[in-house]
Image (cartoon, grey):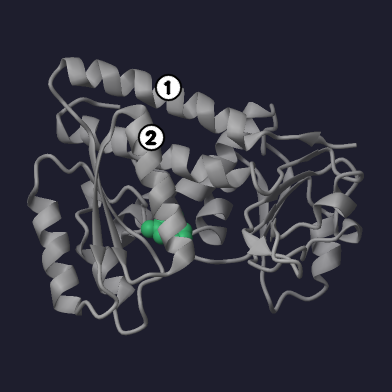
């Protein structure tokens, strides 16, 4: 039976560390600030944004929400980003994705000042990750690495398989595993014999967005299985990309959904916002 990697516990540890550092900064008169932009009324985005604001309040980060109507124009959104780039009290800017279809996400991401890009989505931050000379890491892959470290699992010399090649998770995830000397394979919808490739993995990261996609026959006995998915099953219950009940007896370690990677994403956002405030105030990290 696999050990369960407890994302709630590890995320609480990260947030406690951040809160401690935020308190020390406040003594120097510095308050990290996060601007959260949400456009429209997507219910999932609303939940994520509320959780992010709550986490800010808990660690002592100032947060300001900009809830814009669904018919906001590109020009209005760009004007807001430019205003926030110029504000001294805002250390980090996060625009919750996806945006309504008529808006150009790429243009918005590229307008956020790289030093305030706490999602690490800006091409300049993405490029820095590629060459291993980065400040911000994208929150979800960074959270996965933190979970692996907490469980004493090192990618060094291991076969690591990432299912999914999104810019937000799959691609940066592969890069972080590579930086820690894993042998990395990225699988996607055109991969031939996905099952066999996954079965090679000592560390298997599922970021596909399909409920219970990873079944026990895809997992090598003893492997660490990290589930980035956040889906609903047939009964409407929250579930990951991994069929947890079937895979748990085979895996060596596994993250649950909920309570695995999800809480880590928010903890890493807090860490990035703290780092942004420090860098903008000339304090090296
Ligand atoms: N939508 C889904 N995940 C994310 C994320 O990590 N950041 C932002 N900004 N939007 C998202």
- Mark 1 vs ligand 1: CB under 8 Å? no
Whether residue 252 can be seen here = yes
Residue 149, percent across and down? Answer: 62, 30
Residue 248, percent across and down? Answer: 86, 45
Residue at mark 1? 17
Location of residue 164 with respect to 88 vertically, above or below: below
- Mark 2 vs ligand 1: CB under 8 Å? no
Ligand 1 resides in the quarter of the picture at bottom left
In the drawing, does residue 130 fall left or right of residue 116? right
In the drawing, does residue 284 fall left or right of residue 224? left
In the drawing, does residue 101 fall left or right of residue 74? right
Q: Are marks 2 and 1 in contact (CB under 8 Å)?
A: yes
Return the residue nearer the eye: 103 or 161. 103
Q: Quadrant of residue 190?
A: bottom right
Q: What is the residue that sits farthest to the front in this orientation?
A: 235
Report the Cα–Cα distance between label 2 and label 1. 9 Å
Location of residue 53 with respect to 42 vertically, above or below: above
Residue 106, percent across and down? Answer: 31, 72
Within 10 Å of the Cα at label 2, are there few (<14), some (14-19), or many (20+) other Cα atoms? many
Q: For the N terminus, which image quadrant?
A: top right
Q: Please report the residue visible at 15 percent of the width from the left and 17 percent of the height from the top.
A: 28
Give the numbered dot on residue 271: 2
Q: Quadrant of residue 269?
A: top left
Q: Please report the residue visible at 38 percent of the width from the left and 40 percent of the height from the top.
A: 54
């Amino acid at each position: 039976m696999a050990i369960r990697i407890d994302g709630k516990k590890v995320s609480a540890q990260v947030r406690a560390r951040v809160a401690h550092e935020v308190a020390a900064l406040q003594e120097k008169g510095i308050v990290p600030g996060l601007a959260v932009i949400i456009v429209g009324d997507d219910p999932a985005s609303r939940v994520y944004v509320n959780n992010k604001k709550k986490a800010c309040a808990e660690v002592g980060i100032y947060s300001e929400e900009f809830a814009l109507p669904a018919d906001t124009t590109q020009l209005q959104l760009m004007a807001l980003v430019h205003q926030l780039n110029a504000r001294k009290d805002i250390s980090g800017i996060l625009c919750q994705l996806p945006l309504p279809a008529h808006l150009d996400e790429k243009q918005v991401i590229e307008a956020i000042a790289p030093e305030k890009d706490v999602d690490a989505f800006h091409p300049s931050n993405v490029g820095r990750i590629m060459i291993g000379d980065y400040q911000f890491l994208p929150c979800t892959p960074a959270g996965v690495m933190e979970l692996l470290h907490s469980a004493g699992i090192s990618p060094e010399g291991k076969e690591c398989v990432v299912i999914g090649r999104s810019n937000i998770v799959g691609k940066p995830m592969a890069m972080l595993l590579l930086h820690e000397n894993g042998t990395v394979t990225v699988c996607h919808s055109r991969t031939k014999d996905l099952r066999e490739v996954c079965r090679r993995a000592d560390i298997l990261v599922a970021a596909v967005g399909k409920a219970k996609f990873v079944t026990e026959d895809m997992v090598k006995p003893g492997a660490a299985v990290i589930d980035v998915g956040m889906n609903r099953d047939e009964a409407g219950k929250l579930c990951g990309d991994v069929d947890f009940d079937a895979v748990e007896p085979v895996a060596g370690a596994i993250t649950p959904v909920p309570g695995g990677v999800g809480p880590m994403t928010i903890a890493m956002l807090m860490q990035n916002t703290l780092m942004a405030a420090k860098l903008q105030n000339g304090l090296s990290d």
